[in-house]
Amino acid sequence: MEINEFRINVSLIKRDSAARIAEIRLENSYVTPYVIDFTKENEFMKLDFGVVPDAASDIAPELYEALKARNKGIEVLTGLKAMPARRVVELITSIKKESAVKPIYAVAAATPSNLPILAYLGVDIFDNILAISRAYEGFYFTPWGELEVSSISNPPCQCEACREGLDVENVVRHNTAMLQNEAMLVRELIKREELRNYVEMKCKASPELTVMLRIADDQLKAYINAKYQKARFQRFRRSTAYFNTIESFSKPEVTYFFQRSAEVYSPKSKTVLLLPCSARKPYLTSKTHRTIRNAVGRLIRGVNEIIISSPLVVPRELELVYPAINYDTPVTGYWSEEEINFVAERLASILIKGEFETIIAHVEGGYSKAVEKALSIAGMDCIFTAEGNVLSSESLSRLRLELEKADKGAFDLYEEIFRHACLYQFGMEVGGRPRGRYPELELFDQRLRVARIDARYGCLEPDFMLAEKLLELDRYAVKIDDFDPKGTIFAPAVLEADSRIKPGDYVVFYNSTMIGVGRALMFGDEMVEATKGYAVEVRRKRRNREQ
Amino acid sequence: MCGYIRDTDPGVTQQDLLKQFYSALSALAEKSDVPDVVKIFTSGSYFDSREVSKDTREKISLKLEELEIKKLIVESRPEFVTEEVLDEFDGRKFQLEVGIGLESASDFVRDILVNKGFTFQEFEDAAKFLRHRGFRVKAYLLLKPPFLSESEAIADVVHSAVRIKKLVDVVSINPTNVQKGTLVERLWERKLYRPPWLWSAVEAVKQIRNEGIEVICHPVGRGKRSPHNCGKCDDVVSKALRKFSLYQDLNILDLKCWCMEEWIKAVELERFSRIPLFH
């Protein structure tokens, strides 16, 4: 079979991890995620759909290799409906691993339930083939799942087709509209960088979809643990991370947070105070944390702190880093065994990493259960200072007493916040004098600004000083054509880029005359490969000093 | 994709074959009505002397002449259609018709999807030779080998029939069924294959008949492993196809069922989905 030479252009508009809004041009242009309507002639029909479906690749491997769909510039995947969840995930991620640019079209796969997770994994184009065939079999799509048309007395939908009556043509129209609704919603969520929260919710509609998400997370976890540079996830994002499901504990940014914080954590004292989390983020701005700090006054100086939450365990130094700075978790006071074990294991490893000699736990309820379990894992002891309410005067005076006795180090918390954030984000040390009103902190070296905290994304925004160091180390650097970039750098102007770069990361861009800082809108390898689309949003730039 | 390998027993002797032949005949004799046509369905090659020896063939021919049978139908792969074998049938009192399992006139379908193992040229040579020697030729065409969608399957048998129109006397459409131990069965178990709709057989037969070709079709089996429609109309449609095969009258195939709508969608969409949308 010959490769279909059909020309396809992709232009990225917005990424949310592996999902994206992009303009895909054939003869006409389409905005992804896009649902093709097969009740009409359409130009996608000219693609090569192959003979042997992807779903048969294991049964007839030789025939599959010879007769699979071959198209230049687009991956056409067939038979996903008949494939187990693991293979679907593996197939899509193996394509995304090779190229974040190449669009993926999942043929005859979309339902309102699975469209969001398929888009999340990186599928760009869908169709209404199942919407049509299921309508003919008598099934009616809802955001939740399918209903038998024969069982519906009042259609739970206000679309035009449903108001006209549920004959088969109208059910086709309705089912198609349901898919289009999902695709449009997914687009809005990508804009807001919060597709993941929605996918976690949608996956609860069926065990199969939950399996799909878990496998995808496991796979990303393996990539993250192996420090695979092209892992398709985002470290920093501007949306709130919700922890409403078990799967939310394995969000890739959470997996990354645990791995990275254990790597970079380097406390400056031998004493650590364990505190409960607060609803308000960052924790330091919360009433609970302010009350505790006011009550102990100067005694907290030189003492490290770790905040315990479910599922996060956050050294104070990292509380401005995503997702610690922007998450929400359901609080009932009850901790499940799963939560206790999950948190305890992570707390234990961070306590071991910190090499603490004194541990003071000012926690109660479920928090203390997690602490006790962590201590038994780590083989460490601790002093519990709270009884009942952590803010009661008895609890607080006991805390004061223990803090007075404790061994203290010498460090400035804000300096430590910058140092840890820079280690976390760029793998390098940074120093200087912090200024500003928490959490809007800035770091200065003499009169020059080094970096600032970007509290919206939960990361450090480098200024020129830090940018130049990053460039020297060739980290998060993007080499561009010789021109003066305005608001956005487009992909064709990118010559080289660090393949570690994830969308949302701050990067240093440069050419022979300029240096600048911007926010990546693409993966690093994607910027290099793509011939169109938004690559970097310019934040600041200047001519090279020597010129 | 042939499943007969599992049904083959190398221990069967020529005596066994003859015994089977005679017992089938005696079953007929009991009905007192001696038939005009005898079809020996070997699921192999009647002309392959390793399967049916020259001596066995001779004994069968003599018996058929004795019973004044008018026509014998056998089947064979083209490589066994030799001058020597055909000499055995010269001057017999019955007419000989030889079916050859071409399956498809498309090299791609026959070689790659069916794995048939002979070329179109070999078929053409055998067919021409048979006709030259005055025997009738029937071509078996396979409806819906693995990996062809419903519409591609219909188009393939129709194109095949048209291509061999001048080489054969009759075309027999064989809708695929799912045989044990085959690739098709593994695909079917995973919902990657569905035997053809009976409507597809009807459609193919109509198009082929409209080309002025004599065409027959005897769907075999019942249920999901066999060619089927919605289940409710399967018997009626199968019966109509068998009746059509006798009379060649297209009015017999003027049938209707609600499931035709689903079949039309399958024909329209499965060439894109590459997997069955209806089961």
Image (cartoon, rainbow, N blue to C red):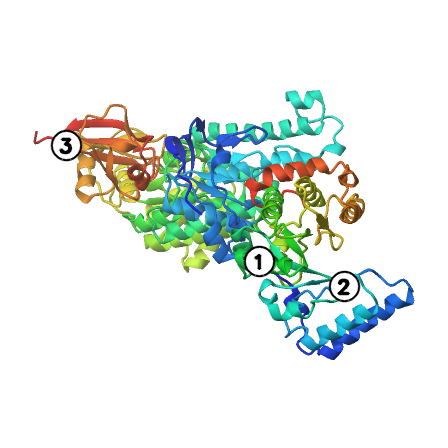
On residue A446, the disc is 3
| Residue under label 2 | B94
Amino acid of disc 1:
Phe
Q: Is A489 situated left or right of A385 in this image?
A: left
> Residue A144: x percent and y percent?
63, 35
Using the rendered image, report if marks 3 and 2 lie on a common chain. Answer: no
Q: Name the quadrant containing residue B53.
A: bottom right
- Identify the element where label 2 is drawn: loop
Q: Residue at x 25, y 42 (%)?
A: A411
Dividing the picture into quarters, in which one does residue B137 lie? bottom right
Q: Residue furthest front?
A: B91
Q: Are dots 3 and 1 on a single chain?
A: no
Q: Which residue is mark 1?
A: B123
- Horizontally, residue A507 falls left or right of residue A395, namely left
Q: Work out whether mark 2 precedes mark 1 in sequence or the reverse, and give the earlier one.
A: 2
CA–CA distance in space, label 3 to label 1 = 91 Å
